[in-house]
Image (cartoon, rainbow, N blue to C red):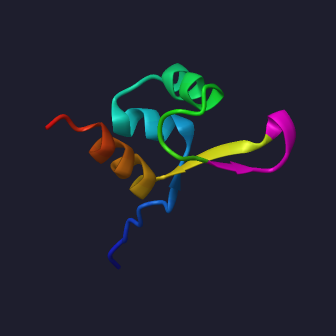
Amino acid sequence: MTETTIAPAVLTPQQAAAYLQLSTGCLAAWRSRAVGPRYIKLGHGRGGAIRYRRADLDAHLDAAAQQ
């Protein structure tokens, strides 16, 4: 039987940081300043899980591209 790998629909901050080649601290700083890629917060309060859609990370890269 062949094993199929499915890319996750959303990425953890660690996965998103690796994808963007940044630190998780950089992503956290961007979230606190309301800049950077869009993110999803699952749950309420400080304990909510943060996730990123790969499409939002790609859109952030496209917007940051220098002409």
Q: Residue furthest bottom?
A: 1
- The answer to whether residue 44 is left or right of residue 10 is right
x, y (%) of residue 56?
44, 52
Residue at left offset 49%, top offset 22%:
26
Q: Looking at the figure, which quarter contains the C terminus? A: top left
**Residue bounds of the magenta highlight:** 40-47
- The answer to whether residue 59 is left or right of residue 51 is left
Residue at left offset 44%, top offset 33%:
17
x, y (%) of residue 4?
37, 71
- Determine which quarter of the picture holds residue 61: top left
Q: Residue furthest front?
A: 67
Which residue occupies the foreground of this view, 52 or 31?
31
x, y (%) of residue 42?
74, 52
Which residue occupies the foreground of this view, 50 or 5?
50
Q: Residue furthest left?
A: 67
- Determine which quarter of the picture holds residue 13: top right
x, y (%) of residue 2?
32, 75
* Residue 20, above or below 52: above
Q: Residue furthest right?
A: 45
Residue at left offset 85%, top offset 46%:
44
Residue at left offset 36%, top offset 39%:
19
Q: Looking at the figure, which quarter contains the N terminus? A: bottom left
